[in-house]
Amino acid sequence: MTKDLYEILGVSESVSSDDLRKAYRALAKENHPDANPDDTAAEERFKRISDAYDILGNPEKREQYDLMRKGGHDPFSGGGGGEGFGDLSDILRSMFGGGGGGGRQPGRRASQIEIEIPFVTAAKGGTVHKLIRLPVTCSQCGGAGGSGRETCVSCGGAGRISSGQGFFSTMHPCANCGGRGYTLKTKCSLCHGTGEIQSSEKVALRIPPGAGDGTTLRVSVSGRPVHVRLRVKKDRFFKRQGRDLLCSVTVTAAQAVLGTALMIRTLDGKVKLKIKPGTQPNTVLRMRGKGVSHNGVIGDQLVTVVVKLPVELTDETKSLWIKLKETNS
Ligand SMILES: [Zn+2]
Ligand SMILES: [Zn+2]
């Protein structure tokens, strides 16, 4: 069965919009479910014809489709090339979202979710427990949504209906069947006819040391593959630069001049850091091996020393600074 939209409508790619509409009318009339009761092949053809005309009959969509078709590379065929397009409804879904009238298949594709993790957990690695909610195929009806499937009386199974002036105007998803092309005599009591239920499962995510924004983990939730994308929370003290951790500490002028020792936060708790006498403002001190370990290599923690000068002086401190000034040092 051809997947080329022009072939479906039996026209050449240079067809005028008038001739295209004529060709569509003739085929739609011939294959319309009303004219072919209980003929599922005709029903399927009618659906394909409607889908094809939905694209080619719209100048913008036709242009987009032509570009795709001529480009040789076909994003929908799943590689190989030359094979033509993938399933027609896939093309429609990919190009324009929705369309095709097919039911959803929640079990097929890996879904992607994003979670936020603490900075230190990302840097050091660890386990994070998260409750992950996902739509999964309904366990009670197996995704069918219920029983007693009947071709939709409104759209004849096409999932879309025409509205506006006359029979051949624009197509819209059918409201009666929600675009599925069928209705259910008895709706599933668990999923209320949608074929999907929400599953939630507490998952233990193992965060590798050195994980960063965008690191993606693959896990299985209710038997379904899920890609978990990590977003790392900011830390008030630390910043990451590859394997190195950057931070800054503030000392007084006297501490910088005379030297001091400070307790500095590291990934492994507080560690004493010596500030040597005569340390200049914005000196960067390197704490070796206190950074992030990634692929067996560990980084450093780089501490910028910020020297804070007094803004307001008491009489006593002012006289001390005046004395310092007189010594000219
Ligand atoms: Zn169900
Ligand atoms: Zn319908």
Image (cartoon, rainbow, N blue to C red):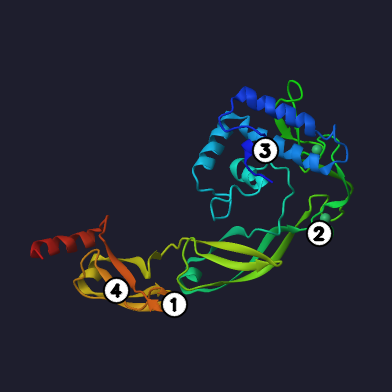
Q: Quadrant of residue 106?
A: bottom right
User: From the viewer's perspective, is 174 left or right of 215?
Assistant: right
Q: Type of residue at label 1?
A: Gly
Viewer-proximal residue, 318 or 266? 266
Q: Nearer the viewer, residue 85 or 296?
A: 85
In the rendered structure, which disc, 2 or 4, sits on the residue that comes first in sequence?
2
Residue under pointer 2:
142
Q: Earlier in the sequence, mark 1 or mark 3?
A: 3
Q: Earlier in the sequence, mark 2 or mark 1?
A: 2
Q: Label 3 belongs to which residue? A: 8
Q: Name the residue: 32% across, 70% down.
A: 302
The image quadrant that residue 154 belongs to is top right
Q: Which residue is mark 4?
A: 286
Which amino acid lies under the numbered mark 4 shown in the image of this protein? Arg
Lower position in the chain sequence, tag 1 or tag 4? 1
Contact (CB < 8 A) between labels 2 and 4?
Answer: no
Cβ of mark 2 under 8 Å from ligand 1: the answer is: yes
Residue neighbourhood size for the residue with mark 2, other residues' Cα within 10 Å, grouped as few (<14), some (14–19), many (≥20): few
Give the Cα distance between marks 1 and 3. 69 Å
Mark 3 or 4, nearer chain start: 3
| Residue tagged 1 | 269
Please state which of the two labelled residues, at mark 1 or mark 4, is closer to the viewer. 4
Residue found at x 59% / y 28%: 15
